[in-house]
Image: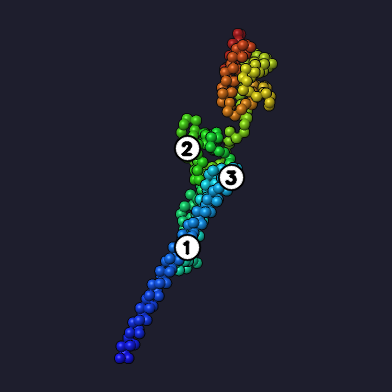
Amino acid sequence: MEIVDVEQTVQQTRENLNTLTGNLALNTIISGLITFLICVIAIRIVKAVLTRTLNRMTRLDPPIRNLIIKLVTTLMWALTIIIVAGAFGINATSLVAVLSVAGLALSLSVQNLLTNFFSGIMLLINKPFKEGDFVEIGDKVGTIKNIGFFSAVLLTPDNVSIVIPNGDLTAAAVKNYSREPNRRVDLTFSASYDASTETVKAAIQEAIDMDSRILPDPAPFVRLLSYDASSIKYVTRVWCKNADYWDVYFDLSEHVRETFVKHGVEMSYEHINVHMMEK
């Protein structure tokens, strides 16, 4: 009889332990799920507040605002994983160590992508150019059509799209022709030695006066540049609005040809004069 009582007691103890273990496991799952739900709600609240705050900062470009939101959101999700893992009884220290090693391995494998990514951030912050600017980057010239986090798209004058990695953009010298409101037009004209300097300069100045898009300040500059083998070169420098640059460039060239004809100035070209001497 005593042996039966002992066996019943042991069996009852086992059942109690199983029930307790099951309750503990269930409590752990419920606690972890509640913790996860709280973290998700917190992420949404922080993201909404951060978005409203950044939208009020008009000085920040939309790509920079989106980048900040994405970085903060990613960081909060990483913290959520660690917090929820702890709530489920997983060692958070070990999890952080594993994530660190995995992050290091990932960063080494995508080193070029990371370089282009951080270069993209620097481009958005420093703003050497913006979409729509006409730029010269190395041996490439064109209009910036898009600036992404990893690359930028350059549209050449003959309508060819060139994708340039951001790492190359930050390493190259960039000439931005659209950044300033005004731009100088530089032209060189050749005239015959037979025409006087004052006549040539007057003819060029008359062509300048024909175009109202040429700005009076800074004043147009017309001077003799050099004496060449078959002609004299005159340099002409005028200022105009950036948007009028190419129209002024081509129109001024055509107007100078007209005024040269009007003033009797020959637009000389390279030639050789042969003098025959009689003995």
Q: Residue 273 falls in which quadrant of the image? A: top right
The percent coordinates of residue 275 (x first, y second) are 60, 12
Residues marked 2 and 3 touching at CB (< 8 Å)? no
Contact, mark 2 vs mark 1 (Cβ under 8 Å)? no
Q: Is residue 134 above or below residue 23?
A: above
Residue type indicated by callout 3: Arg
**Quarter of the image where the N terminus is located:** bottom left
Q: Position of residue 58 (x, y in %)?
A: 59, 42
Image check: 214 left or right of 97?
Answer: right
Label 1 is placed on what type of residue? Thr
Q: Residues within 10 Å of mark 1 (few under 14, many from 20)?
A: some
Q: How dense is the environment of label 2, judged by Cα within 10 Å: few (below 14), some, or many (20 and up)?
A: some
Q: Earlier in the sequence, mark 1 or mark 3?
A: 1
Which residue has dot 2 on it? 162
Q: Which residue is mark 3?
A: 56
* Near-viewer residue (210 or 55): 55
Residue 152 percent coordinates (x, y): 50, 41
Q: Residue furthest top?
A: 278
Give SS at disc 1. helix
Q: Secondary structure at mark 3?
A: helix
The residue depicted at 59 percent of the width and 11 percent of the height is: 276
